[in-house]
Image (cartoon, rainbow, N blue to C red):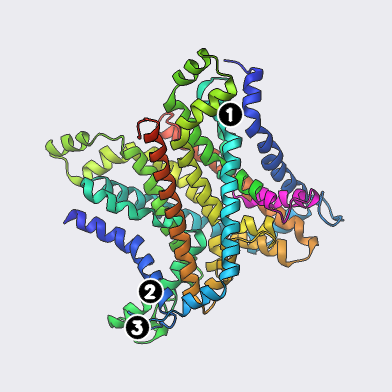
Amino acid sequence: MSWTSKHFLGLSPLILPYLVLFCGGVFLTFCQSFGVLTPLPYGGGALDAYVKLMGDPSFFASFFFSLGVAAVSALFSVLAGTFLAYRVWQLPRQLATAALVYKIPLILPHISVAFVILVFWSPSGILASMAHSLGFIQTLQQFPNVLYSGWGIGMILAYTLKGIPFAMLLVMALLVRFDIRQVQTAAMLGASGLRIFFTIVLPRLAPAMHTGFIILFLYSFGAFDIPYILSESRPGMLSIHVYNLYFKHDLARRPEAMAILVIMFCFALVFIIAYSKIVNHLDNGVRKL
Amino acid sequence: MKHALTFLVLVLLFVLPVVVLVLVSLAPEWRFPDVWPENFSFRGLTYLARHKKQILTSLSSSLLFSLLTVLTTLVMCLFPASVFARNQFPGKALLEGLLLTPALVPPMTFAMGLHFLFIKFSLADTLVGVVLILAMFSYPYMFRSLVAGFQVMGEGYGICAKNLGASPLSVLLQVELPLLMPAVIAGGSVVFLVAFSEYFLVFLIGGGSVASFTGTLIPLLNSSNRSLAAILTLIFLFLPIVLFLIIDMALVRVYRKKGMVVS
């Protein structure tokens, strides 16, 4: 039960890169946010970048916008994914193989999923054409402006399409070990389909749902690829904000970009810890991650 | 009836996009308000043929760094996973949690700091740099898969080989690694997909010198050339599927040959 040199040696192929690349990378991000080790010598005070951000309403708008997009898409993904996984699990064997099509968006890159959303939802896209032929709209302008509404709906759709199969995958992994006789017994004793789902199945799937939510939420919160294709001008996602500061402005604004990254990093850590604590507290110590 | 509804939802969500992509790739002039394209043409494929060289270069570059990333994560995780699966030591749960964080926190947060270090050590704009950053972000999937694999395998085979006089290294490489292949492939597939489909990290660290398939696709997505974008997206879908099928069949064949049970 104690550390031996064998443990150290065996773990070193992972610990060393972890310390140098991951911890080192985060450390350098912190440093640069304080104006240390920046490509150009930075004249200002150590906390300048943070002071500037705290006084910048557009930063807060971006922050809460990212939070909203991430929370809504992760929630939809997990709920829809869990429900679909349960329905797929109930399929007879021969049909279950065909249901493997759910893995398609898992294979597609995020940028391709964003492209699919563009093709379907753009004002002259497939859905607009369908609405036209069904007589709901007469001209292009009547189709609701889904992608540029200012609410991030396009990004939410893309993240949800990518997230549903991911949640399904996690939930399926638990369902294969789930005894179908529990469901059958409940049905024989007269429980309704809804009752069975909510009181018997759902509590057992909760660990996978929590894991899925944490991963999907944090990914959508900080990722770049989908917003790069689907973002609206403002408020933008934080990652786009950072990208613009890093690449499109002069080097003097580098600490600001890094300060946003530091805030994102700390937020992610606090979120993981707080979420696991709360869930642990709710159902007595079942591990989530 | 109930099952039909499930299937309808699955088809609408996951199959319809692929069908539409196939149509878009074959009908460049498909416009509002046609629900079905008026005429089909092979213009998208002609574009593909014309830009063949650039597309093949970026595709092989993407394949190369993705496969190297899988290999790197395997090397990084093999020994540590065996230690984790078989030993108890103080702080194990905490260490495991810490080791999984790179897959959870936004990769930008450490990649942009590292960019500075990579420039200093001339790793920026190189294949090695790209593989390192992708491995750093994706190894947790390999790690978890290998830990589970070691736990399922148990210690019996290793102890047996050791009793017969095998060195620890040959136990791992000759006895345990072949038995771990299903776990390696499960973890490796995820790592491959993450690396193969990543745009931003490759763009940041590769800086244009390391070509990537995503980098080729990005400028096409918002252009008028939707056909080509759709074709490339379909390649993104089918190439990994073909790759996974080949690996799966090869594994089954090797296992049969050795008389092992395929699970």
Chain to which mark 2 belongs = B
Main SS, magenta region, reads helix
* Count of numbered circles on the image: 3
Determine which of the numbered discs, if any, sits on residue B23 in the image: 2
Real-space Cα separation, disc 2 to disc 1, in angstroms: 48 Å
Q: Amino acid at mark 1?
A: Phe
Same-chain check, marks 3 and 1: yes
Q: Counting other residues with Cα less than 10 Å from the Cα at mark 3, is it few (<14), some (14-19), or many (20 or more)?
A: some
**Disc 3, disc 1: CB below 8 Å?**
no
Residue that mark 1 sits on: B79
Say what secondary structure mark 2 lies in. helix
Chain to which mark 1 belongs = B
Residue at image x 39%, y 34%?
Answer: B257
- Of A283 and A77, which appears nearest the observer? A77
Same-chain check, marks 2 and 1: yes
Q: Counting other residues with Cα less than 10 Å from the Cα at mark 1, is it few (<14), some (14-19), or many (20 or more)?
A: many
Provide residue A255's location: percent of width, then percent of height: 76, 55
Determine which of the numbered discs, if any, sits on residue A162 in the image: none
Q: Earlier in the sequence, mark 3 or mark 2?
A: 2
**Disc 3, disc 2: CB below 8 Å?**
no
- Of B89 and B197, which appears nearest the observer? B197
Say what secondary structure mark 1 lies in. helix
Q: Earlier in the sequence, mark 2 or mark 1?
A: 2
Provide residue A196's location: percent of width, then percent of height: 22, 41
Is B243 located above or below residue A243 in the figure? above
Is A289 located above or below residue B214 in the figure? above
Determine which of the numbered discs, if any, sits on residue B34 in the image: 3
Part of the protein shown in magenta: B106-130
**Quarter of the image containing the N terminus of chain A?**
top right
Real-space Cα separation, disc 3 to disc 2, in angstroms: 12 Å
